[in-house]
Image (spheres, grey):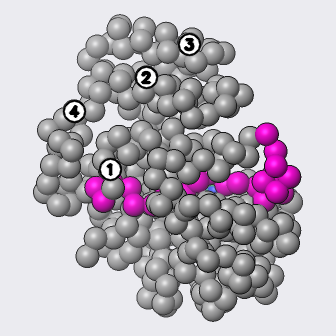
Amino acid sequence: MTVPFLLAPMAELSHRPLRELIEGFSGPGSGCDEYFTEMISAGPLLGGGPFESWYMDAGPCPERVVYQLVGSDPEQIVRAALLLDSRECLGIDINMGCAAPAIRRTGAGVAWMASIDKAGSLIARVRQAVKKRLSVKLRIGFEDDFDYLLNFCRRLEGEGAELITLHPRTAGEKFKRSPRWDYVTALRRELHIPVAGNGDVASATDLLRRADGGPVMVGRAAVRCPWIFAEARSAQNFTDYHGFMQKEVDLEETALRFLELLIKYQPPEFYISRARRFFNYFCDNLKWAHYVKTLLNREETLGGIERALRGYFGEHPEERYRKT
Ligand SMILES: Cc1cc2nc3c(=O)[nH]c(=O)nc-3n(C[C@H](O)[C@H](O)[C@H](O)COP(=O)(O)O)c2cc1C
């Protein structure tokens, strides 16, 4: 059985340019199966803020895009879910996992995990409102307590959630703490709906290793290596998707392509912040990653970033191609 590969929702990263880049390495059925968007705040979405159309751009493959909503007010979340449900997409995901203090303080993200009843009734309301697939992304909770997590998820399942993604760290744990993948396995055994596992998948080999019991979601590694899904599928099927196996990855071309995609599919106000976020991970492919990041972070325009990248690869031609 082929298990689905999912791109994680990541603020300022999981947008159309990244999807375009990933699709460029693969294509339908041979790479990423579901693209979660960066979290979209329910309130501003309803308020029709100036950037909301960019957040809602589900290209280039809306049928595989899952909109992720974040918020604390059930009424707003339901209305925002309804709005997104009317667009072409695969599903709606509710963020119950984000532990960033600014989000948590407002009662959004992982704050929902404090009350099974409140979270359950939110999911029941959203379920009634939307037709598309409804999913929830969450963490273990505030404590390392599997029974609480299980009761929480059973309630969500009972109220109509159709997929749960578990990032198996507690609310207080940072990336340094290893994710507890055994909780993903245990949750899969107990629930009737699919459970996607997420956390620290670092390579195509890792992705395949995790893809033994259910969907796998990849975040940071898919920014560093946008070919990760295509590479894993090729290896899994011993096939040559789009010639992927024969190719080395051209890192310079990929970096420059990303800049083009930013210009094509994002508003100018987002260029720099999104370029910095992307290159913060992508540059980890390079030997002198820290140096390149410092160079790029000094730049205030995409033109400057492009020049810095070209200059770096000009000085270090051996860095340009990466074997997969
Ligand atoms: C920069 C960044 C932004 C993120 N934004 C979101 C978000 O908008 N919604 C969400 O549910 N999780 C968010 N996350 C968490 C990821 O979806 C994922 O759970 C986490 O990075 C672990 O997966 P990984 O080890 O594959 O990166 C974010 C993570 C990062 C690094």
Q: Which of marks 2 and 1 is in front?
A: 1
Q: Do the residues labelled 2 and 4 touch (CB within 8 Å)?
A: no
Query: Percent position (x, y) of residue 33?
Result: 39, 61
Looking at marks 4 and 1 on the same chain, the residue that comes earlier in the sequence is marked by 1
Q: Check if residue 32 falls in the magenta segment.
A: yes
Mark 2 lies within 8 Å of ligand 1 (Cβ measured):
no
Tell me the residue at 32%/42% (across/down).
Answer: 25
Numbered circle sitting on residue 8: none
Alpha carbons under labels 2 and 4: distance apart: 16 Å
Q: In this view, does 73 lie to the left or right of 66?
A: right
Numbered circle sitting on residue 248: 4
Q: How crowded is mark 3: few (under 14 residues within 10 Å), some or many (20 or more)?
A: few
Residue corresponding to mark 3: 303
Q: Residues within 10 Å of mark 1 (few under 14, many from 20)?
A: some
Q: Nearer the viewer, mark 4 or mark 1?
A: 1
Tell me the residue at 42%/39% (across/down).
Answer: 21
Tell me the residue at 15%/49% (across/down).
Answer: 240
Q: Check if residue 180 falls in the magenta segment.
A: no
Q: Residues within 10 Å of mark 2 (few under 14, many from 20)?
A: some
Q: In this view, does 46 lie to the left or right of 153?
A: right
Q: Is residue 247 left or right of residue 118?
A: left
Tell me the residue at 17%/61% (across/down).
Answer: 237
